[in-house]
Image: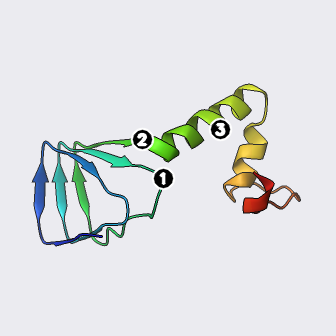
Amino acid sequence: MARFEDETFREQTILVDGNQYINCTFQSCQIMFGGYDPPAMPNAVFDSCQFGLTGRADLTKNWLRFISGAGGAELILEVLGLGGGNQQFDDSDF
């Protein structure tokens, strides 16, 4: 994907999937992740930015909301690797 270095982005909507943003500054941007390859953003600076999900990532967010509404907040933490439960998950579970 694309590589950006020492750049400043202003008032843009940026789909970050798979891109590299090295030492970049984001001012008043909407940073969107679509659920594909995660971006690399070492030393990035975010000033008055909003973050959001789109595409596959947004579908995942909706699924996690559904699970949470069904009383599964602890399960969500476990799926994300943040819980202390004993249940193990891998990609074949979903």
Q: Residue at x 72, y 53 (%)?
A: 79
Visual colour scheme: rainbow
Counting from the top left corner in percent of width and height, residue 91 is at 72, 61
- The amino acid beneath tag 2 is Thr
- Which circle, 3 or 1, is nearer the viewer? 1
The three-letter code of the residue at mark 3 reads Leu
Which residue does the numbered mark 2 point to in the structure image? 54
Depth check: 12 or 6 in front?
A: 12
Q: Amino acid at mark 1?
A: Gly
Q: Marks 2 and 1: in contact by CB < 8 Å?
A: yes
Residue at 42% across / 41% down in the picture? 54
In the displayed image of the protein, which residue is found farthest to the right?
86
The residue identified by callout 1 is: 35
Does 59 sit left or right of 5 as displayed? right
Image location (x, y in percent) of residue 45: 23, 60
Question: Would residue 82 be found to the left or right of residue 57 on screen?
Answer: right
**Rendered residue at 55%/38% (across/down):** 59
- The secondary element bearing badge 1 is classed as loop
The residue indicated by pointer 3 is: 64
